[in-house]
Image (cartoon, grey):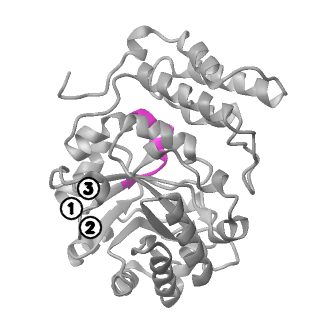
Amino acid sequence: APPMAWYGLDAPPPTGREALSVAPMLEWTDRHYRFLARLLTQRTVLYTEMIWDATIVHRAPDLDDQLGFDPSEHPVVAQLGGGTADYMEAAARICKRYGYDQVNVNCGCPAKAKTCFGARLMKEPQRVVDICKAVHRGCGEPPTVKCRIGVDALEPAAFLQPFLERLGGAGVDHVIVHARKALLGLDPTKNRSVPPLMHGVVHAAAEANPWMRITLNGGVTSLAEARTHTDEWGVHGVMIGRQAYHEPWILADADRVMFGRPNRAESRRDVLEAYAARCDAFLADREPFVKPGRRSREGHVRATVDPLLSFFHGTEGSKAWKAHLREECSRERLGASGFSTSDIVEGGMRLLPDELLDERPPDDRH
């Protein structure tokens, strides 16, 4: 596969240029979280929340709230959800105009929606092929696909390899495979725990398809575990999900562990100060707006604070930090105004010891 342009040629084997990515997570991987993540890691690939194709098509050209992002977020991938080739093509074309590095087709979400999208698409592989070709036409390059190892009665042993071959026939050369089946009768939360993890199925798929980049997703909670999958089992990369949100500081060591390069962050304090300053500028530049289908306002202070709640996960200061942030955000919900992200962050930092705030990620430079 050709090298991805955003990394240049300096990413060392065996990890490759997409050794780590953060999964698209609805209501979590918004622009604020992605900016925080990018302050922690230069090279990890970031994904948007899933964006509905119809939302993009019907709301064009007023899409900055859905598709806008900070240039520093690169590499960043837009994940599209939908089941109609024409809409997916149009949405992909718009995503490309916004400057996303790639477009990803969601074939893994186990939502109970009656429309054919997400994991339900896996039952109609020809529809997936048509969508992938349409997205290719829209954005000018093959999409990536995120899927599961099987769905309902379609067992991995019989389903996954033919499905990957059909994707390859449509020009897809990178597939992110969640190592669980999707059970469409279960809600999405239970689909992350009830179907058993089967990492070996993804390992076998990577071995059987050396022409395709296979990224493993599901159940990976540490960078050390991610390196085991890339080094010992030959997957192209690992996509980490909720752990990267519930413990964002683990990304501070990602450039060193996963890419063999110096870590970006200098200290927790530096990251928080840079993040708060950016959020202040963002909020000063726009009026609050409501995302379709969501109560939270990305243009409100509380939306900038949410990604910080677990920034000190696992430390003695975590409880006090969270309590302070939640109390300050509750003031905004009650109608208070006149305070900024920096005000909240600085107040929380005063509760923590200097040695915690000045903690550095492991790095060969120090």
Q: Residue at x 49, y 47 (%)?
A: 242
Amino acid type at circle 2 is: His
* Residue marked by disc 2: 203
Relative to 222, 289 lies left or right: right
Q: CA distance from mark 3 to mark 1?
A: 17 Å
Q: Which mark is residue 17?
A: 3
Q: Which residues are magenta?
A: 239-249
Instruction: Name the quarter where the N terminus is drawn.
Output: bottom left
Q: Are marks 2 and 1 in contact (CB under 8 Å)?
A: yes
- 324, above or below 44, in the image: above
Q: Residue at x 75, y 40 (%)?
A: 288
Of the pair 187 and 337, the residue shown nearer to us: 337
Mark 2 or mark 1: whose residue is earlier in sequence? 2
Q: CA distance from mark 2 to mark 1?
A: 6 Å
x and y percentages locating residue 157 in the rendered image? 35, 81
Instruction: Name the quarter where the C terminus is drawn.
Output: top left
x and y percentages locating residue 249 in the rendered image? 41, 32
Secondary structure at numbered mark 2 = helix
Whether residue 78 is in magenta: the answer is no
Q: CA distance from mark 2 to mark 3?
A: 18 Å
> Toward which corner of the image does residue 50 lie, by quadrant?
bottom right
Secondary structure at numbered mark 3 = loop
Secondary structure at numbered mark 1 = helix
* Residue marked by disc 1: 233
Amino acid type at circle 3 is: Arg
Q: Residues within 10 Å of mark 1 (few under 14, many from 20)?
A: some
